[in-house]
Amino acid sequence: MVGLSLSSGAESSISKKAFGELEGKPVTAYTLTNGQGMSAEILDLGGIVRRLNVADREGKMDDVVLGCQDVAGYMTDSPYFGCITGRYANRIAKGKFTLEGKEYTLATNNEPNHLHGGVVGFNKKIWEAKDAVVDGDPVLTLRYVSPDGEEGYPGALTSVVTYSLTKDNGLKIHYKATTDKATVLNLTHHGYWNLAGHKSGKTILDHSLQLHCDAFTPTDATAIPLGEIRKVKGTPFDFTGPHKIGERIGAENEQIEFGKGYDHNFVINGEAGELRPVARVTESGSGRVMELLSTDHGVQFYTGNFLDGSFEGKDGQVYQQRMGFCLECQFHPDTPNQPSFPTAVLRPGETYEKTTVYRFSTES
């Protein structure tokens, strides 16, 4: 890569290059590489993880995330490939919530509900970027100040998202935010994964998944939670032991029918605020293993049900249904309207902070 700048440590490096423009402003792609040769290409547009090159059992590197070829793809066609979603990831019922006695109205960009921050969410903003090598790990820090009233949300919100590639082949994402007025906040990473490689042409149905989640939040037909925490035992949602993703994806089950497959929030076992295991995914063909850890409350498991081959992604790849899966760590969906769920309200003087790690290895 011909980079505009290069920072390096003993075993890692960061380079950057122009990726295009958005409304006359430059978009930059940063490539973080650790000492094991794992690399991540991350855009200052939406904090998008555009590429993640991970070794298979033979040591061959392959890109395991779905993405777009250019800026236009991310602004028009992308189903949130690899981005930061916010201010509120997932759905808010009918685009309305009440906070401190005042009702706020948001865009209903996923009729009849609000989805992933609205029409122009954090995924479509250029973030201020700083790169460095810290304790031998390449680090990219992104900052965005969302003005009071943007997409209907109250408060001027300052968000800082830090990406690092760790020595044990983890993509670590740390989130931190403050506000000057009470607001609701739910940031997440919306990566689409295929451990066989994004150009493999394979679906993710043969991937094996284990979730450290004993319960999930069932929804109505529009993907809004019913307010119930339902045990997964005895249902197609029981991934407490490893199962192939495709094993029960067509089961006769109302929740499966509502989601057209899996598109549900699971409740992570243990105490929120502690970094703890969430998921383990394996792909037998390549031997790749992805372990997910998080401090969050829930994780949305989505199986690319609405990918339909309607546009060409990066490297000329056309993504068909279920060629990628998502594991999005988050507050539970529609929390602003669900008093039984942990609160997603952030007030002045408080700090929103959480960490998620996607860690990669191989097995024989």
Image (spheres, rainbow, N blue to C red):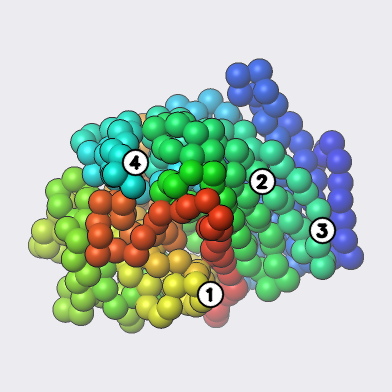
Residue at 62%, 63% (x, y): give it: 172
- What amino acid type is highlighted by mark number 3? Val
The mark that comes first in sequence, 1 or 2, is 2
Question: Residue under circle 2?
Answer: 142
- What amino acid type is highlighted by mark number 1? Leu
Among the 4 quarters of the image, the one containing residue 151: top left
Q: CA distance from mark 3 to mark 4?
A: 35 Å
Q: Position of residue 272 (x, y in %)?
A: 44, 73
**34 relative position to 23: left or right:** right
Residue at 70%, 26% (x, y): give it: 26
Question: Residue under circle 1?
Answer: 275
Among the 4 quarters of the image, the one containing residue 2: top right
Question: Residue under circle 4?
Answer: 115
Residue at 50%, 61% (x, y): give it: 195
Q: Position of residue 105 (x, y in %)?
A: 30, 33
**209 relative position to 122: left or right:** left
Q: Residue furthest top?
A: 24
The mark that comes first in sequence, 1 or 4, is 4
